[in-house]
């Protein structure tokens, strides 16, 4: 670390739990952020400011006026531009030392597998079940920890799925892929602007903790937030031995 980095990250380095070694682990890390919208915006802000060395930001959408109420990576001037590029521009202003790879593409299973394999941690900041399951499958297959967030109306949730731990559940243990869940989208249901900030920021916190090796992650716990009352509920979630993705009968060998 050079003098500039020692200054930039000094408030992290002062923390006993991080120090120079922990900060170096962050600098050496590669975070894959899938979705540069409401959750991905605050998450990427703190990953970049906190000194994650490489951030791959994936989003195939373009900036729209209706996004700006909550997607704080983007600006009014950038309406019509790809969100991945807009995000890269913002992150470069916050921390020019971070290597941001902007991918304006829709990722299929094969591409996801390739991207997840290179990552130290993955942040699921998407908004539909099909993509969430695809990301979970790739993370479990490559044993890369996954920080998953969701926000709709005034309801938020966050958890960590960590395949490096034998006791920890995966996303499919919680939401079995063969069951039907009602798909709810911000575009039809609405979402309270700061809710995505709260959840996305917590995703960044969990990702930084996982990479630096600090404390205890949310693996095995699901946090639910009702922002109307600002009340949190913590639910223990167990590994499902019959899980189609991580269970004993699943395709990939654990
Ligand atoms: Zn599972």
Image (spheres, rainbow, N blue to C red):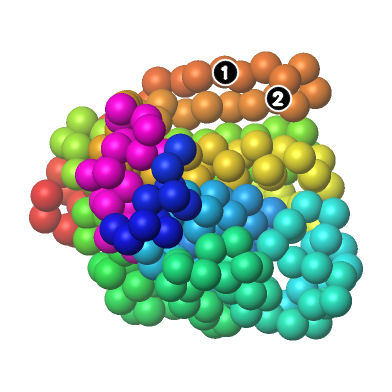
Q: Gap in Å between the C-alphas at discs 1 and 2?
A: 8 Å
Give the residue displayed 39% in from the left and 67% down from the top.
54
Question: Which dot marks residue 202?
Answer: none
Question: Which dot marks residue 226?
Answer: 2
Give the residue displayed 60% in from the left and 61% down from the top.
94
Do the numbered discs 1 and 2 sit on residues whose CB atoms are within 8 Å?
A: yes
- Relative to 160, is 245 above or below? below
Q: Nearer the viewer, residue 154 or 137?
A: 154
**SS of the residue at dot 2?**
strand
Q: Which residues are magenta?
A: 12-32
User: Residue 251 in the image: x percent, y percent?
Assistant: 19, 59
User: Residue 106 in the image: x percent, y percent?
Assistant: 54, 78
Horizontal side of residue 8 vs 156, given as left or right: left
- Kindly tell me whether mark 1's CB lies below 8 Å from ligand 1: no
Q: Callout 2: few (<14), some (14-19), or many (20+) C-alpha neighbours within 10 Å?
A: some
The question of residue 21 being in magenta is answered with yes
User: Residue 232 in the image: x percent, y percent?
Assistant: 61, 19
Q: Callout 1: few (<14), some (14-19), or many (20+) C-alpha neighbours within 10 Å?
A: few
Work out whether mark 1 precedes mark 2 in sequence or the reverse, and give the earlier one. 2
The question of residue 166 being in magenta is answered with no
Give the residue displayed 29% in from the left and 37% down from the top.
19
- Kindly tell me whether mark 2's CB lies below 8 Å from ligand 1: no
- Relative to 191, is 253 above or below? below
Q: Nearer the viewer, residue 197 or 243?
A: 197
Identify the residue at the far left of this view.
253
Question: Which dot marks residue 233?
Answer: 1
Residue 52 appears in the rendering: no
Give the residue displayed 80% in from the left and 82% down from the top.
80
**SS of the residue at dot 1?**
strand
Q: Nearer the viewer, residue 25 or 38?
A: 25
């Amino acid at each position: 670390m050079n003098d500039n980095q020692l200054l930039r990250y000094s408030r992290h380095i002062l923390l006993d739990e991080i120090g120079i070694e922990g900060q170096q682990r962050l600098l050496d890390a590669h975070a894959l952020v899938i979705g540069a919208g409401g959750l991905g915006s605050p998450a990427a802000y703190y990953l970049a400011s906190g000194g994650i060395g490489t951030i791959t930001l994936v989003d195939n959408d373009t900036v729209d006026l209706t996004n700006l109420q909550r997607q704080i990576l983007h600006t009014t001037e950038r309406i019509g531009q790809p969100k991945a590029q807009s995000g890269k521009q913002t992150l470069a202003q916050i921390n020019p030392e971070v290597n941001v790879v902007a991918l304006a593409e829709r990722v299929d299973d094969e591409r996801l597998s390739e991207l997840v394999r290179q990552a130290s941690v993955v942040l699921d900041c998407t908004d539909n079940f099909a993509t969430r399951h695809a990301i979970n499958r790739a993370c479990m297959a490559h044993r890369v920890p996954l920080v998953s967030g969701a926000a709709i109306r005034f309801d938020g949730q966050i958890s960590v799925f960590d395949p490096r731990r034998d006791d920890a559940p995966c996303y499919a243990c919680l939401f079995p892929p063969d069951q039907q869940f009602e798909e709810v989208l911000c575009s039809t249901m609405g979402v309270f602007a700061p809710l995505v900030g709260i959840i996305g920021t917590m995703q960044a916190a969990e990702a930084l903790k996982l990479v630096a090796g600090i404390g205890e992650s949310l693996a095995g716990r699901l946090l639910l937030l009702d922002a109307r009352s600002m009340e949190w509920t913590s639910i223990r979630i167990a590994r499902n031995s019959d899980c189609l993705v991580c269970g004993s009968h699943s395709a990939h060998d654990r």
